[in-house]
Image: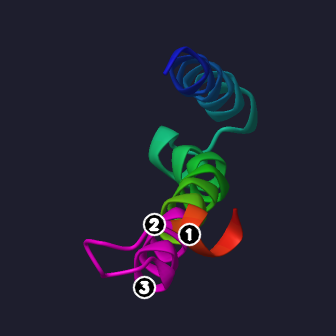
Amino acid sequence: MALFSTLIGATATVTAVASGYIGFSTTVVAVLVLYPMVAEVATRLIQSAIERRDADETSADLPYYDARTYFG
């Protein structure tokens, strides 16, 4: 969480400086800066959801299943 907060603060700073320096509106610069970050976070969330679903599908559904019986 601390890393995420730091990234948000750094992004806000870069956005403010860039919008003043370039002359674009803050909204345009914010979209240009935040889009890659949002895409990365969304990709990681989707990937973790898929991995969790796959892990649930491959796990044994039997309540009496004990891996030690088969694998030692």
Q: Residue at x 51, y 43 (%)?
A: 25
Quarter of the image for residue 24 reads top right
Frontmost residue, 5 versus 15? 5
Residue 71 x %, y %: 69, 69
Q: Residue at x 55, y 27 (%)?
A: 4
Which residue does the numbered mark 1 point to in the structure image? 69
Gap between marks 2 and 1, in whole Å?
Answer: 6 Å
Gap between marks 3 and 2, in whole Å?
Answer: 17 Å
User: Which label's residue is closer to the chain start, 1 or 3?
Assistant: 3
Q: Is residue 11 above or below residue 54?
A: above
Which residue does the numbered mark 2 point to in the structure image? 66
Which is in the foreground here, disc 1 or disc 3?
1
Badge 1 vs badge 3, beta-carbon distance below 8 Å: no
Task: Give the magenta-colored segment's residue range.
Answer: 48-66
Which residue does the numbered mark 3 point to in the structure image? 57
Q: Is residue 9 above or below residue 65?
A: above
Residue 5 x %, y %: 51, 19
